Image (spheres, coloured by chain):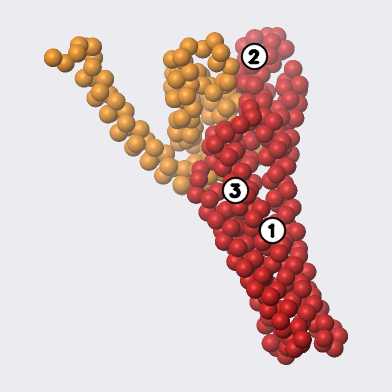
Amino acid sequence: MFRGCSGSSAASSKAGTVEGEMLKGHLDMIVLAALAPGPAHGYAVIEEIKRRSAGAFDLPEGTVYPVLHRLEQAGLLAGRWVTAESGRRRRVYELTRRGEHALAERRAVWEQFSDAIGGLFKGSRTGKRPA
Amino acid sequence: MMRQYLGRLARALDFDPSLSRQVVQEVEDHLRETIERDPVADRLEAERRAVAKFGDPLAIAAQFAAVSLAALARRVAFAAVLLIGAVFIAMKARLAWYGVMQCPLAEDMRALSGIVLTIDRWAFWLALLTGAAGWIYIDSRRAPAALTREYRARLRRFSVLCLAAAAALIVCVAADGLLTVLRLIGAQWSVAFVVPLFSVAIEIACAGVLVSYLRAMAGRTTRAACLTPAA
């Protein structure tokens, strides 16, 4: 399970910290991908991330909100206040046209990177040194 | 417990009151939804779990600080260039008015006026160049996810550029004020003098607005700096 951005990593292993850093580095892409199906509020975005990653990305939930605000500021998301059925005011975010393009670009880069790393791991699967 | 948590978050975000209000409202909605969906029967336990899952309010506020300062820096940069442009328009309008009203400079003021005009020009171009450089500098870089040392150093460099622009603009406006006095001092008083005086007032207001933006930026940066370890 990837744990990220908690700041309380004293007890975490070195590998765990690396995973956290890895997750932090891709948080923008993760949030954009979670919003790809349609508009959602912060809670729903976090739930979508958990659901689609099968629980692998277990972030401190509060770290997603600064990302939503930053992406909105960058013009990749648009936010608006709505009143929920419960009567509570909540902020709903959706991808802008720029956000959709940014997500498509990041997805292409990620797939290229993933294929390259996959190729490297395939070659080193046996763990044998080359003769 | 949730109220206490939201209070701590609001205090941690007090470097940006409007952001603080918005974030607290969003987080309150999030926590209420988490508590409602928690299967545990004990409400207090559900609140404790929701708050624990949300994370440390200071760490969250530090991430928001980067977002808030980036937005403010962009606004300051844009305002600086806009205000310098407004000063330029006010200067040109005043010069056009002198032409229309045939209001020449008195002969004995020409030498002094020449020196002040040179200072005025240099100060204006310095303000424009440093203001534009600040805008390009801050706008060409993405805001980071957190208020890192590097980002604070970047904000410091940006502030230096803006301070240089503001200082040069103040010199330029002061020189414009002096040039206006030198121009009008020998002339017969007329109601039409309101036009150049008003243009100088606009310039003073522009410089004042820029200084107030820089003060806001310095204040927010100082308050936000408490959220992160010293560089």
Q: Looking at the image, is mark 1 or mark 3 nearer the viewer? A: 1
Which sits earlier in the primary sequence, circle 2 or circle 1? 2
Q: Which amino acid does label 3 sit on?
A: Phe
Camera-side residue: B167 or A19?
B167
Q: Which amino acid does label 1 sit on?
A: Ala
Tag 1 subunit: B
Camera-side residue: B97 or B51?
B97
Rendered shade, chain A: orange
Tag 2 subunit: B
Which label was assigned to residue B167?
Answer: 1
Res. B103 in view: no
Which residue is under mark 2? Answer: B49
The residue furthest bottom is B102
Q: Residue at x 65, y 66 (%)?
A: B123
Q: What element carries label 1?
A: helix
Q: Which residue is drawn at 70% across and 74% down?
A: B116
Residue A63: image x %, image y %? Answer: 57, 27
Residue B108: image x %, image y %? Answer: 77, 86
Task: Tell me if residue B45 comes above or below residue B5 in the rendering.
Answer: above
Q: Is residue B69 left or right of residue B3?
A: left
Which label was assigned to residue B60?
Answer: none
Q: Evaluate whether label 1 is on the same chain as label 3.
A: yes
Residues under numbered marks 1 and 3 in contact, where contact means CB atoms less than 8 Å apart: no
Q: Is mark 3 on a helix, strand or loop?
A: helix
Which sits earlier in the primary sequence, circle 2 or circle 3? 2
Which label was assigned to residue B158?
Answer: 3
Tag 3 subunit: B
Res. A76 in view: yes
Rendered shade, chain B: red
Q: Which residue is drawn at 76% across and 26% down?
A: B7
Q: What residue type is labelled 2?
A: Arg
Q: In this view, does B102 lie to the left or right of B59?
A: right
